[in-house]
Amino acid sequence: MGEKITMGAWGERRAAEYLRSEGIKLVETNFRSKIGEIDIIALENNKTVLFIEVKTRAGLSQGLPCEAVNKHKMRRLSMVAAYYMSLNSVRASLGNMPEHRFDVIEILLLNGKAWLRHIRDAFRIGDAGA
Amino acid sequence: MRNRNNITSIGLAGLEGYKVEVETSISSGLPAFIIVGLPDSSVQESRERVRVVLKNIGFEFPLKRILVNLAPADTRKEGPIYDLPIALGILEASGQLEGIPKDCVFVGELSLEGSLRPVRGMLPIALSARKHGAKEIFVPKDSAAEAALVRGITVYPAEHVSEIVEHLQGINEIKRAGEYAAKEDEETYHDFSDVKGQPGMRRALEVAVSGAHNILLCGMAGSGKSMMAKRIPSILPPMSMDEMIESTAVHSIAGMTGKAAPLLPHRPFRAPHHSVSSAGIAGGGKSLRPGEMSLAHNGVLFLDEFPEFRREVMESLRQPIEDGRLTITRASGSVTYPSDFMLVCAMNPCKCGWYGHPSGKCECSCDSVKNYRGRISGPIMDRIDIYVEAPPVDYEELTSKGENEPSSAIRERVMIAREVQLSRQGTVNARMSHEMIEAHCGIDEESGKLMRAAYEKFSLSARAYNRILKVARTVADMAGSVDIGFAHLAEAIRYRNPHG
Ligand SMILES: [Zn+2]
């Protein structure tokens, strides 16, 4: 590794590799907007749009990585996803997809190994309180 | 796929049930699961349970925008009982289940494995379902016996949500709950024959129970007053079916019914400790549960060491004594529970308990004795129909001879006296209206003089005046007399508290 990258960026790259290996098509990485960002947007089976939050942590001292997706984060992700789906360019390509899903990929670095876990349908809008 | 549907459930406000329509709509869009319609936090938690359960029992939790509306929107929805209708609503609206009949009611909390947990207030819910025209009700198995107390509605008990799904799909029909057969009251009571002497207190108690009058027993420690009060259940007349249903409904809301034999077999006898709180006696808490006064509905509320009760507890007795029901109001709402009880109080004559004992054991000052009795306020004393003082038992024992009468003999007389009252005016004497007093409590001229003398001597209130007439009516009924005679009235006046 020549350039120095953050652990978060490394995790996102690792997650992208994993998704490709699963045959899931990446649509966008690091989507940014004024209201927030989404790590990965992907398409599964040409049917389901995935909004994926990647959480990477070294060690368990702060709990499991997925536990970092709190109510505040859920609300934020819902808003960014809604904004994303409203973009004209997106509507042209993804507008008629029947399903949308919020996933979390957690990557835990422990004893020199990376443990990856893909949590499908990690939350629904409303989980953070209506 | 229908995308939207309605399933009927029932909510409770006190004993009153109201229809709740669980409206589910599923549309495309970002995956959401939202419950609206004034759900409290326990209803919000059902989102998580329903989601897990549907997946666990092999259904899809659709990746769509799921909106559940609990209508009417202006009533607060409480508790986890909407889990079942919400789960079925999602299955039907997403096309995974068909044919939920319209005149059905569903209630039940789900465990994460999909089993159904018992429901608090099952009896009033089932009564309300029938009132709203439902033909069938699906309930948790452990609540089924209680729901089956209600005639005219088919009860389907289920242990697991899958049983209900399969029933609706026509795969496996659920066996209906059988109508509940009331059991004989098998409880063995302490008997009046165990209590020595005290003919005066015995008589006063029989008068009180015969007409459901409030009574205060005053006697020193060891006079047997508490012993006698605790034997009241053995002489209470049996409940009618309607009374049983009413009393059971109150216990059901308090979560105090047994799952195998839910119907309350005998009149309640509630004896809260004098440390009881206002909420404990009157009801309350977040979900406005009934208190001791409502649990004593159709039965007896026994308050031992009456002057030791909190002031606000004593004062809260006034409304139910007058109205036979009790309204609790909190920020979360207001509910009314039936609270028609016979009040039985016992007290020592003084703080130490020995005032008036021939041995002179009492060391209370005159002020202290006055003070102790003064803890019972005028308005409460006014509502006590019968006040009786018990002489020390060692003196009494000398004069009592032979066997004491067993409870069964007293109970038989009580039942006859009650029968007379119910056939004459449809209620017990203690509950007579002004019109009924007018019609049934006439007194002759001689008795009128006696009444006037008493009126002046005790400076009676109008309420006390009417209460004396009601007790006199009971004494006359016990004697099998159509009219209230001089002796009947004289006995009733004797029961007024001379200190009150
Ligand atoms: Zn004393």
Image (cartoon, coloured by chain):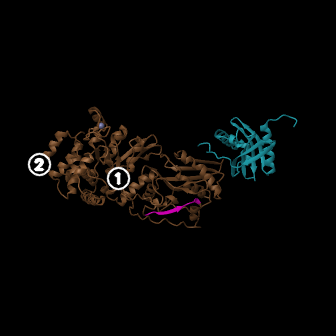
Going by the picture, which residue comes out furthest to the left?
Answer: B446
Whole-percent x, y for residue B73 in the image:
50, 47
x and y percentages locating residue B203 in the rendered image: 24, 52
On the question of residue B140 being in view, the answer is no
Q: Amino acid at mark 1?
A: Gly
Task: Check the residue under mark 2 and report the chain it is in.
Answer: B
Residue type, numbered disc 2: Glu
- Mark 1 vs 2, N-terminal side: 1
Colour of chain B, in one word, is brown
Rendered image quadrant of residue B220: top left
Q: Which residue is mark 1?
A: B299
Would you identify the image quadrant in which residue B166 lies? bottom right
Residue nearest the viewer, comparing A3 with A50: A3
Residues B411 and A32: in front is B411
Q: CA distance from mark 1 to mark 2?
A: 36 Å
Chain corresponding to cyan in the figure: A
Which region shows up in magenta? Answer: B152-161
- Asked if residue B30 lies left or right of residue B387, the reply is right
Q: Is disc 1 placed on a helix, strand or loop? A: loop
Residue positioned 72% across, 47% down in the render: A50
For the residue pair B312 and A47, the one nearer the viewer reads as B312
| Residue assigned mark 2 | B446
Query: Image height check: is B370 above or below B107?
Result: above
Q: Is residue B463 left or right of residue B233?
A: left
Quadrant for ligand 1 reads: top left
State the SS at label 2. helix
Q: Quadrant of the C terminus of chain B?
A: top left
Badge 1 density bin: few <14, some 14–19, many ≥20, Cα 10 Å: many
Residue at 33% across, 48% down: B226
Chain of the residue under the numbered disc 1 shown in the image: B
Quadrant where the image shows the N terminus of chain B: bottom right
